[in-house]
Image: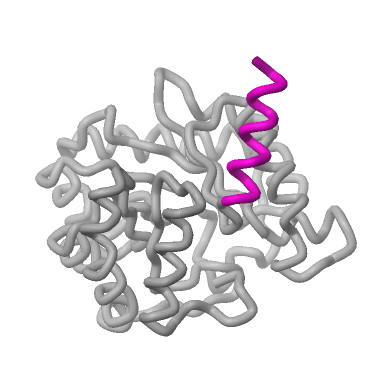
Amino acid sequence: FSDVRPLVETDLAIAHALQLIEEGADILDIGGESTRPGAAPVAPVDEQKRIMPVIEAIAAIAAKRGRLLSVDTRHTSTMALAIKAGATMINDVSALGDDGSARLLAETGLPIIMMHMQGVPLSMQNNPLYADVVDEVAQFLDAACHRAISAGVRPDNIWVDPGIGFGKTLSHNIALLNATARFAVGGRKTLIGASRKGFIARIDRDGAASDRIGGSLAAALSAASRGANAIRVHDVAQTRQALAVWSAIES
């Protein structure tokens, strides 16, 4: 959704997914509802019309190549259909906020990424406030993990995401990125998604999303150095190269 022309045409989306596999993506994340600031909600039936043909087309290829196929959705009905079609991971910006999501994940035994968001995408950037953003996000994610485990989700299947750009100001985002290690407590797996986000433009020259690759790479390296287990990106080849060179130097 950050692209100049979103990949809403099925053939384009499938081709792009296959390109990302070739570039070295370990996980493909397929979503049919934009959750960027100001985005209106999308009905599950419309979300499913967008994503199901793509999932059905690439699930077998992803499995053969040893890639996880993640579905970016907050709707239980979409999760169920996607899992039936071959999805192997769920990425939920609502942290299992929809009724039945936790039970579904417990029954299927698939990994779940739970993210923090203050408010809803349509209005989340309207003056977000925190007394201590790191503490509050950490407490939210702790509670979400507890709910998931109580519903039967295995602890080793739980990932957390502090939600960079989801109801946060520039200073909030910087504080959360700096505190990446805080969210990996107790061996919990942490995902950071900062790629092309608006805070990069506010730091440097107010560029369009497609002009934020340098800042995205800087955020990825910072997250990796602080223990993030996965980096959610748009520019796979460039990020893998940056991480490979960084890792070679550090080691």
Of 13 and 103, nearer the camera is: 13
The picture quadrant where one finds residue 110 is top left
Instruction: Please identify the residue farthest to the front as the structure is shown.
Output: 22
For the residue pair 137 and 60, the one nearer the viewer reads as 60
Residue 59 as seen in the image, left or right of residue 74? left
Res. 131 visible in picture: no
* Image side of residue 238 versus residue 33, left or right: right
Which residue does the image show at 40% across and 26% down from the upper left?
Answer: 188
At 69% from the left and 29% from the top, the residue drawn is 246
How is this picture coloured?
A: one colour
Q: Is residue 153 above or below residue 70?
A: above
- Residue 169 visible to the viewer: yes
Q: Position of residue 191 (x, y in %)?
A: 49, 40
**Residue 35 % position (x, y):** 50, 67
Residue lying furthest right:
205
Measuring 31% from the left and 83% from the top, which residue is drawn there? 46
Q: What's the magenta bit mostly, secondary-structure-wise?
A: helix
**Residue at image location 59% in from the left, 64% down from the top:** 124
Which quadrant, please, contains the C terminus?
Answer: top right
Q: Answer with left or right where residue 93 lies relative to residue 201.
A: left
- Quadrant of the image occupied by residue 165: bottom right
- Count all numbered tags in the image, as a single digit: 0
Residue numbers of the magenta segment: 237-251
Q: Which of the image's four quarters has the N terminus?
A: bottom right
